[in-house]
């Protein structure tokens, strides 16, 4: 038996239908675990999110020179030995497929067709699609690039059922298995970061098995995970209870094979492990992902929903108010959002939706330029928001290719189907089409200016009355929430849970929600002491555009005993900003007499420093150290 397939076994499996990252599959998939949630079939958004998606579609996805993405794969250009040009096609393409599922634009479909035809034309007789010189295959970022090519081809097959793309992906996988067997049969000693970059190919291998039922891919997937737990592997299962920043010693060379804290690649591996869990039902896999997710949230994820320094986990949550080198890579933001979304689909639990919402409205939208054409590679909490640099001579960087994957991951997940009825995960003005438990078409009309306010009104349209359960998320930050159905209050609402309303629903039924949008003061008591302001899901920031008082000034927010601060909305069309508020702060007087409150302007984090001028901004406001009130 081939080396890469040793120690494998075959499990009797059931056949169900499953989706890939929000891409609903129509063919048979060989899984034993079903997702709890399934995407809407149609979504028509209006307002703020619709504008952001439209900007990204027209100014980034459709503006991309697709032929330039294909150029590195051509025979005359297969000379690479260490760079990652081969990832850009797949990242851009999977973004574009998600965009097409949200908005079936004819022009975009033509671009997708051209992109697949062009890529498959570069496939060698042995199945290879990549840009590495033949004697350097499997090195550095080669397998990582093959992964993204497979993900793109499988996304196209999911969308179109075009067999050529499925066959192309299968040939890439076959070639990879053959190359590994010819070498030494080991994947975790290839490439970078303890094999995490290379072995994250687990995700498309599992998806490929789901589409084909070819046991070779199932065995390969299990062999990858077996190798994770060898001494040279990343030990992603056995170390899942260890802080992600402390699983391995600090390496002598930061960006190297010995580095075991690489955030993006680690989470990509866990995305693949969830796909293998769906295929096997092995609870050890799911538990490892859940443990790691909880650890990342507790030790790394900051107030805006992301983290990492110089692309690595570093225990950053505790020092998020300090200057941090190369903070908050957008690729990490996107992958955290996608991993959380995977767990939401799988479990239906509100904590995952809470995290996705925080990340989406703050860290993700904050890394995108207002028009959607440019994405920052790093986005500090205090500093400047600047475009990322070009990589690999490709005219873009990894985060510009990856950012829209996170952006377009959300629309079909705002309201999702479940066996009992449907589940409202997020709030955005628009129309949502789903299928009822009895197979009827349901249209949910959601009317709201969220997140400008916390008032949401929904109405249903369904052909015949039907008994079902509608689950509506009560965000963890909303301590006082009102929910009514046809004017009757729903009681016992719990923050951070879903309110579940089971009844016979009919056309014209109305659901109204009022969330707690009081401004909240969040404080860090360890030195340096700092404070920040949040309203609903939106983190607010000071911006040097708005007033003469220096943004580094020590300003104590005027809050009540419960930590709520009064925010006064600044009306009108605010150029370059989504939200503007006034709030009262007490400046440090530097004299014996206390200073009087002053009114300070705050804007939403995504708009801070994100105008035509790259102004300086600040989420964490420094606070004075007073030994008279410090805890002993």
Image: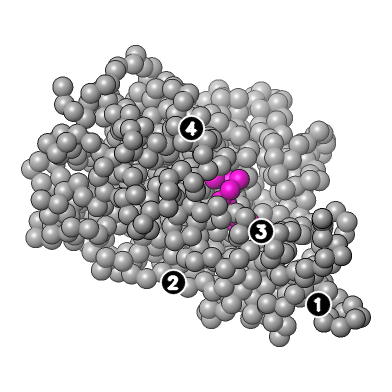
Q: Secondary structure at mark 4?
A: helix
Q: Residue at x 50, y 56 (%)?
A: 308
The quarter of the image holding the C terminus is bottom right
- In-front residue for pair 189/38: 189
Residues 249 and 314: in front is 249
Q: Position of residue 348 (x, y in %)?
A: 58, 33
Which of the marked residues, 2 or 3, is nearer the chain's N terminus?
2
Label located before the other in sequence (4 or 1):
4
**SS class of the residue under badge 3?**
strand
| Cα separation between marks 3 and 4 | 31 Å
What residue sits right under mark 1 in the picture? Answer: 588
Name the residue: 37% across, 20% down.
Answer: 15
Residue carrying label 4? 288
**Residue named by callout 2:** 387
Mark 1: give few (<14), some (14-19) or many (20+) Cα within 10 Å. Answer: some
C-alpha gap between disc 1 and disc 2:
35 Å
Residue 610 position within the rendered picture, expressed as x and y whole percent measured from the top left: 55, 72
**Residue 297 drawn in magenta:** yes
Helix, strand or loop: magenta stretch? loop
Q: In what quadrant of the picture does the N terminus appear?
A: top left
């Amino acid at each position: 038996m081939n080396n890469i397939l040793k120690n494998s076994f075959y499990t009797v499996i059931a056949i169900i239908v499953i989706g890939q990252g929000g891409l609903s599959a129509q063919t048979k998939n060989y899984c034993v675990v079903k997702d709890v949630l399934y995407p809407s079939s149609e979504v028509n958004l209006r307002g703020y999110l619709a504008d952001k998606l439209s900007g990204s579609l027209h100014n980034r996805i459709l503006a991309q020179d697709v032929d330039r993405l294909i150029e590195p794969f051509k025979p005359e250009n297969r000379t690479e030995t260490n760079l990652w040009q081969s990832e850009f096609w797949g990242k851009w393409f999977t973004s574009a497929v998600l965009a097409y599922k949200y908005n079936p634009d004819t022009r975009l479909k033509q671009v997708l067709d051209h992109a697949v035809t062009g890529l498959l034309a570069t496939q060698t007789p042995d199945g290879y699609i990549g840009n590495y010189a033949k004697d350097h295959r499997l090195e550095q970022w080669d397998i990582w690039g093959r992964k993204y090519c497979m993900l793109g081809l499988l996304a196209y097959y999911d969308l179109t059922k075009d067999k050529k793309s499925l066959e192309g992906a299968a040939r890439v996988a076959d070639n990879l298995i053959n190359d590994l067997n010819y070498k030494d049969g080991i994947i975790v000693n290839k490439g970078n970061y303890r094999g995490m970059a290379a072995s994250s190919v687990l995700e498309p291998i599992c998806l490929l098995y789901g589409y084909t039922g070819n046991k070779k891919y199932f065995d390969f997937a299990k062999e990858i995970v077996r190798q994770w737990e060898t001494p040279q592997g990343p030990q992603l299962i056995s170390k899942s209870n260890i802080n992600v920043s402390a699983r391995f010693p600090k390496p002598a060379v930061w960006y190297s094979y010995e580095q075991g804290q690489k955030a993006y690649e680690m989470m990509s591996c866990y995305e693949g492990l969830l796909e293998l869990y769906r295929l096997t039902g092995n609870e050890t896999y799911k538990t490892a992902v859940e443990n790691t997710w909880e650890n990342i949230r507790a030790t790394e994820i900051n107030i805006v929903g992301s983290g990492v320094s110089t692309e690595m986990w570093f225990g950053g949550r505790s020092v998020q108010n300090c200057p941090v080198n190369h903070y908050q890579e957008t690729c990490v933001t996107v992958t955290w959002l996608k991993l959380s979304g995977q767990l939401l689909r799988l479990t239906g639990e509100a904590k995952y939706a809470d995290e996705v919402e925080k990340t989406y409205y703050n860290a993700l939208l904050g890394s995108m330029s207002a028009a959607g054409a440019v994405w920052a590679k790093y986005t500090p909490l205090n500093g400047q928001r600047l475009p990322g640099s070009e990589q690999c001579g490709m005219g873009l960087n990894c985060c510009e290719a990856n950012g829209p994957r996170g952006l377009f991951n959300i629309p079909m997940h705002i309201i999702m189907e479940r066996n009992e009825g449907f589940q409202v995960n997020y709030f955005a003005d628009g129309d949502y089409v789903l299928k009822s438990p009895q197979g009827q078409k349901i249209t949910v009309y959601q009317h709201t200016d969220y997140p400008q306010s916390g008032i949401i009104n929904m109405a249903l349209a369904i052909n015949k009355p039907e008994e079902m359960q509608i689950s509506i998320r009560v965000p963890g930050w909303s301590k006082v929430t009102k929910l009514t159905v046809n004017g009757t209050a729903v009681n016992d609402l719990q923050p951070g849970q879903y309110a579940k309303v089971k009844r016979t629903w009919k056309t014209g039924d109305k659901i109204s929600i009022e969330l707690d949008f009081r401004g909240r003061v969040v404080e860090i008591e360890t030195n340096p002491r700092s404070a920040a302001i949040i309203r609903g899901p939106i983190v607010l920031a000071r911006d040097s555009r708005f007033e003469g008082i220096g943004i580094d000034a020590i300003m104590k927010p005027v809050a009540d005993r419960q930590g709520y601060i009064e925010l006064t909305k600044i009306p009108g069309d605010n150029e370059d900003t989504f939200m503007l508020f006034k709030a009262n702060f007490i400046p440090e007087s530097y004299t014996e007499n206390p200073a009087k409150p002053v009114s300070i302007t705050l804007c939403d984090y995504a708009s801070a420093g994100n105008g035509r001028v790259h102004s300086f901004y600040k989420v964490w406001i420094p606070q004075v150290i007073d030994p008279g009130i410090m805890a002993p």
